Structures are given as C-alpha cells and as structure tokens.
Image (spheres, rainbow, N blue to C red):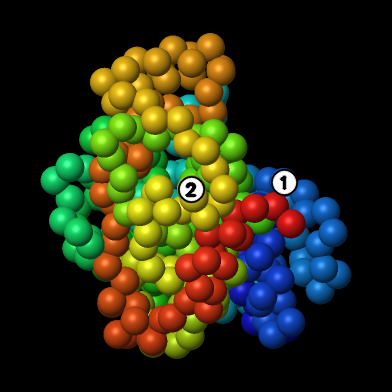
Amino acid sequence: MRPAVAITGISGNLGRVVAKLLHTEERIIGIDRRPFPGKPKDIELYQLDLRKKRCEDIFRKERIRALIHLGLVHGHSDRVGDHHSFNVLGTTNVLECCARHGVPKVVVLSSGTVYGPSPDNSNFLTEDAPLMAAARFPEMRDLIEVDMFAQSFFYRHPKIETVILRPVHIVGPTVRNAASQYLRTRHPWTLMGFDPLLQLIHAQDVARAIQRALEPGIRGVYNVVGPGEAPLSYILRELGRTPIPIPHPAARPFLKALFRYKLAGFRAAELDFLQYLCAVDGSRAQRDWGWRPRFGLIETIHSVLPD
C-alpha cells in the first residue's frame, strides 16, 4: 500500500486548499468530524472525532508517512468546554497515535496570533517570544496549549520530524476567520488614534508552506509570513472600506454589550488587534528552507473578497 499523508480538519476551508494542492502528488487520507462535499475521488475520508479511540484504528490500518494537523476549532463557540476539549484532547490523541505508530513527520498549524497583540511587543516577534495571547484574550488559551503540547512532543520524540507553523492572519476567498470577516465588513470599527501594522498571508501560500514543511530534514518552530506588512488604514482603503472610528475608552464596554446580546460577531478582547502590534519575524523560515510567498501584497489583500 502506498504511504499516505493524513490531514486532520480536511473538510475545513484551509483543509480543502491543502488537499487540492497535495492530492495529485500524494495519497491523501482525511480525518474530520464533518462531511467533505465534492471530495476528490482519490481522497479517502474518515469521518470521526479526533478525541475518540477509533482514531487510532486509522494509524493501525494505514501506512501514514506524515500527518498535517489542521483539525482545530477557531473562533467562538457557545460550547466553550467542547471547544477546548476538541482542540487540546484531539491534538494530544492524534499526536500520541503518531508516536505509537511510527509516523516520521508531523506538521502542526498553529498561528502567529498566539503571541498576542500588546503595547509592549517589539516590532517583529521571533519564534522564541513568549506566547502571551491568553493574558488578555482567555479564549486563546486552548490554541496556546496546542502549540505548547506540539513543542513538548518535538522534544519528547526527537526521531519524529515535527514542524510547528505559526502563520500570520490567513485570508482568502473561502476563509472564514476573524480577520477575513472583519475586512469584509463594509463599515468596520477602528480605534481613534491607532493604526497598527497588519500582516496577511494568502491561504494558498499557507498551503505551499505546509507542502514545504513535509520535505525531509525540516523540523522546528517557524513563523510564516506573507508579502509584507501594511497599516490597517491602507488595507481598508485598498478594499474600499469606510471605517467607523470609535474612541477606544468607549469601544470595549460598547462591544461587550453588543456581543452579549449577539449583535456583534467578535469579542471586545479582539479590539487589541486594532490597537496594538502583533507582527512576527519570518526570517527563520526564509533562512532554513527558502520560504517566499507567491502572492504579492495587493493580491493578498484583495483575496479576502469572495469570488
């Protein structure tokens, strides 16, 4: 049987982009709770929860040469406990399956947001910077736990080439994360007196970075950056948005009230990204494996618009 690359979270928007890029060259196995409408015929889907014991049956049955772990719940959920359990316990279970069954390569997709926006941040954060996002945004706690567990897995299983990727804000026509949804808003909030630099990366460039990370010899933690950074005001002008400036002392209590009554789609803590810097240094990936995004800045900004 031909060795396979297993992709958790394959039914998600980014998972589909990664599968589309890889399936013509690799045998792909998908693992996801959700169905995969329009799935290519050469991709086999196991529809199950990563926390379940049945997950290990896949590793017993299949010859898996690499795991790409995208199976994380991002954003907000009314079932916060389930949200945390799925991310942390699901990651723990699937990575331990890799260790028990000798999977030689593991790629975990984290996020550059785990560093957290802060008035104390340096201009460009390296991979050694502390992961502080949960200090002001408790909902990030599970994603930080996943990242830290993947780091401990790296040291506990040195024979497995483990790669942890921390991309900047991912955008694309099918991406539904907080950054993309904000930039699609016709009249987005901004905070008076603040114009932070933002870093965006096209979803297809993230898929290409994951593909590169599968290559033998690559291991470690890497920030993954796009074509550069730009002030929020520039990005909004480029998209033709008309922002609504809000005095920042009033913004948080107002947004908390709106979110409580489900009149807003993001939490007050996320206003930090409109106020403080959270820019990362991508030089390690550039140095170690020659990483370069394919999409330019203007293309990347405009990719947020649906096709």
Side (left or right) of 127 relative to 265:
left
- At label 1, the amino acid type is Arg
Q: Is residue 134 visible?
A: no
The x, y position of residue 267, in whole percent, is 43, 27
Comparing 166 with 202, the one in front is 202
Relative to 91, residue 274 above or below: above
Give the percent coordinates (x, y) of residue 239. 56, 51
Q: Which residue is mark 2?
A: 236
Residue at left offset 42%, top offset 54%? 234
Q: Amino acid at mark 2?
A: Leu
Quarter where residue 18 is shown: bottom right
Residue at image x 28%, y 77%?
284
Q: Position of residue 201 (x, y in %)?
A: 48, 64
Answer with left or right where residue 2 lies relative to residue 150.
right
Q: Dot 2: within a 10 Å radius of its alpha carbon, few (fewer than 14), some, or many (20 or more) residues?
A: some
Looking at the image, tell me whether mark 1 or mark 2 is earlier in sequence order. Answer: 1
Q: Mark 1 and mark 2: span between their CA atoms?
A: 34 Å
Secondary structure beneath dot 1 equals: loop
* Disc 1 target residue: 34
